[in-house]
């Protein structure tokens, strides 16, 4: 390599000096032209994913990244990720979504909750959005139709509110003599709260159950709700599907055991954390599929052309240890139908 900063050009008289300087400049120009294109080209900008969720969950984030990897994208190597978590405060979603838009991310993913998806949709009509919601995305206004979303959003519908009647039926099989039902919901998600309350009221009336709704949106309010339930003495408890409740699943299982209240939950993670029984789709698998869709969009697919996928597998999980703790005998026929029994 020629060191042009230190080597001195000898003095030459008249035209010889001019020729030498021209030759030297020509040499440098030739070197630049001869350099390989890779040495001169700027590296392409790394795409950035805006990841917006209600609570931090390393397991679900890992599932999302695994799905993303199916398209060849690895965080830190050829894609970056900006994570925003509301930490249970749904009112934070509009500002968090607006921040991701200001940062001009390549795609926004809201893999776990309806309020996040709605906030992202309100914040941008141009940046692609991949959502995961438990409610009907057509009724929510996220897409024009399941087969042809038609806008800048698509994603996964993993069904939570829609299986409320089935969950209640399983609770009735567990406790055929039950007459009083309590439902725990989060008032900070009014869309899901209204859906669950409507579905449960109809289902409870169909099988002759009395109906009581209890609200909670913080850890302290969960404790207060169980104090209320202890006084009301319901026969069974239906915990509404909610990402905040998911983040407090251990607390919910502990309080239900402490007050000896048989409880039903939306997904298997609750039963794995000590809850009595769960029925619903595998939400972690939905996070994986959101990652798959995000990768396809980064490769050039348009959200309008990617149909909304719907979960088709539902699983019943029963925790026998939790049943023994509250002195409950699980009917053999219900155990036989379970996809998994936790001893």
Image (tube, rainbow, N blue to C red):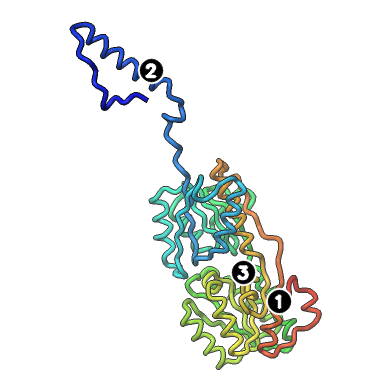
Identify which residue is drawn at 30% across, 17% down.
25
Residue 283, percent across and down?
A: 62, 64
Q: Are marks 2 and 3 in contact (CB under 8 Å)?
A: no
The quarter of the image holding the N terminus is top left
Identify which residue is drawn at 44% across, 51% down.
124
Mark 1 or 2 closer to N-term? 2
Q: Is residue 24 above or below residue 192?
A: above
Q: In this view, does 6 lie above or below 177?
A: above
Q: Nearest to the eye among marks 1 and 2: give it.
A: 2
* Residue at which label 2 appears: 30
Residue 294, percent across and down?
A: 56, 50
Q: Nearest to the eye among marks 1 and 3: give it.
A: 1
Tell me the element at label 2.
helix
* Residue at which label 3 appears: 161
* Residue at which label 1 appears: 342
Query: Outermost residue toward the top?
Result: 15
Q: Which of 248 and 312 is in front in this view?
A: 248
Q: Which image quadrant for residue 338?
A: bottom right
Tell me the element at label 1.
strand
Q: How far apart are marks 1 and 3 (CA)?
A: 25 Å
Task: In the rendered structure, find residue 265 and report the number of the disc placed on it.
Answer: none
Mark 1 or 3 closer to N-term? 3
Identify which residue is drawn at 64% across, 74% down.
272
Q: How crowded is mark 2: few (under 14 residues within 10 Å), some or many (20 or more)?
A: few
Q: How far apart are marks 1 and 2 (CA)?
A: 74 Å
Tell me the element at label 3.
helix
The quarter of the image holding the C terminus is bottom right
Identify which residue is drawn at 52% across, 85% down.
225
């Amino acid at each position: 390599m020629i060191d042009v900063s230190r080597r001195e050009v000898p003095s030459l008289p008249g035209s010889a000096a001019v020729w030498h300087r021209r030759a030297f400049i020509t040499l440098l120009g030739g070197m630049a032209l001869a350099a390989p294109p890779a040495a001169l080209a700027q590296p392409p900008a790394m795409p950035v994913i805006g990841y917006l969720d209600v609570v931090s969950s390393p397991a679900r984030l890992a599932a999302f990244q695994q799905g993303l990897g199916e398209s060849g994208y690895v965080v830190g190597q050829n894609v970056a990720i900006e994570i925003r978590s509301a930490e249970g405060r749904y009112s934070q979603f509009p500002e968090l979504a607006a921040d991701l838009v200001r940062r001009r991310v390549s795609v926004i993913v809201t893999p776990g909750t309806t309020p996040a998806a709605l906030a992202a949709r309100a914040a941008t009509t141009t940046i692609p959005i991949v959502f995961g919601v438990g409610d009907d995305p057509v009724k929510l206004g996220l897409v024009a139709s399941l087969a042809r979303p038609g806008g800048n959003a698509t994603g996964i519908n993993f069904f939570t509110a829609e299986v409320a009647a089935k969950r209640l039926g399983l609770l009735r099989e567990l406790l055929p003599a039950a007459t009083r039902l309590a439902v725990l919901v989060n008032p900070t998600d009014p869309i899901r709260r209204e859906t669950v309350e409507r579905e449960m009221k109809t289902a409870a009336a169909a099988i002759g159950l009395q109906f009581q709704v209890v609200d909670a949106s913080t850890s302290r309010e969960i404790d207060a709700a169980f104090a209320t339930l202890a006084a009301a003495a319901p026969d069974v408890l239906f915990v509404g599907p909610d990402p905040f409740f998911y983040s407090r699943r251990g607390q919910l299982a502990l309080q239900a055991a402490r007050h000896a209240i048989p409880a039903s939950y939306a997904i298997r993670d609750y039963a794995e954390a000590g809850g009595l029984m769960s029925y619903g789709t595998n939400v972690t698998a939905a996070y994986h599929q959101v990652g798959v869709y995000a990768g396809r969009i980064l490769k050039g697919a348009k959200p309008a052309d990617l149909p909304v996928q719907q979960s088709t597998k539902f699983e019943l999980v029963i925790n026998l240890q939790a049943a023994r703790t509250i002195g409950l005998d699980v009917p053999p026929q219900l155990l036989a139908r379970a996809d998994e029994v936790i001893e």
